[in-house]
Amino acid sequence: MVDDTPESLIPYDEIVQEALRDVVGRVLSEVEATGVLPGGHHFYITFKTRLPGVSIPKHLMERFPDEMTIVIQHRFWDLRVAKDHFTVGLSFGGVPSTLVVPFSAVTDFVDPAVDFSLKFQASGAPPEDDEHDPPQNDEPLAVDDGSNVVAVDFTRKK
């Protein structure tokens, strides 16, 4: 079967990815404004550690040379959200750390309290399906695959 769909001159995939990253920024901005997570909400955020703009302590970079998942739930502080990144304080093995994460480095955003998930391709990173270590700053919680999962994949088979 031949795919006769013409190549788009409009970068729909980039536009959608940017709009969905704005969802993450808006959610984090609301937490920043109130200083608390509402109800049972909490977030698993996975990001590429080596992309431009990511700033994490050296000991974490050594431990997570490609990708890292953090949990924003009980023990976080100084959450600050800018247009293109967020900053958050977390503790790893009792050592307080400040992380700076550009939204373009985020690959997954999950709120297991409501079975909500967004998946992204990190800007400037090739697509990967590799497994990674579980979050290290909090105990992992089981995440059921629910109907509220949004995955956007614009790759085409040729």
Image (spheres, rainbow, N blue to C red):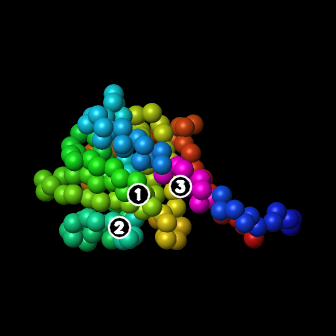
Q: Is residue 18 magenta?
A: yes
Query: In the rendered structure, which disc, 3 or 1, sits on the residue that comes first in sequence?
Result: 3
Residue at mark 1? 84
Residue plotted at (41% across, 41% down): 27
Rendered position, 44 above or below 13: above
Q: Secondary structure at mark 3?
A: helix
Q: Secondary structure at mark 2?
A: loop
CA separation, marks 2 and 3? 17 Å
**Which residue occupies the extreme front position in the image?**
83
**Residue 97 shown left or right of residue 48 in the figure:** left
Looking at the rendering, the stretch of residues picked out in magenta corresponds to 13-21
Structural crowding at the residue carrying mark 3, measured as other residues with C-alpha within 10 Å and reported as few (<14), some (14–19) or many (≥20): some
Give residue 53's mark.
Answer: 2
Q: Secondary structure at mark 1?
A: loop
Residue plotted at (59% across, 53% down): 16
Q: Amino acid at mark 1?
A: Asp
Judged by depth in the image, the label closer to the viewer, 2 or 1, is 1
Q: Are marks 2 and 3 in contact (CB under 8 Å)?
A: no
Percent across and percent down for residue 108 are 45, 53
Q: Amino acid at mark 3?
A: Glu
CA separation, marks 3 and 1? 10 Å
Dominant secondary structure (helix, strand or loop) of the stretch shown in magenta: helix
Towards the viewer: 117 or 5: 5
Give residue 18's mark.
Answer: 3
**Which residue occupies the extreme top position in the image?**
39
Residue 38 at least partly seen: yes
CA separation, marks 2 and 1? 10 Å
Structural crowding at the residue carrying mark 1, measured as other residues with C-alpha within 10 Å and reported as few (<14), some (14–19) or many (≥20): few
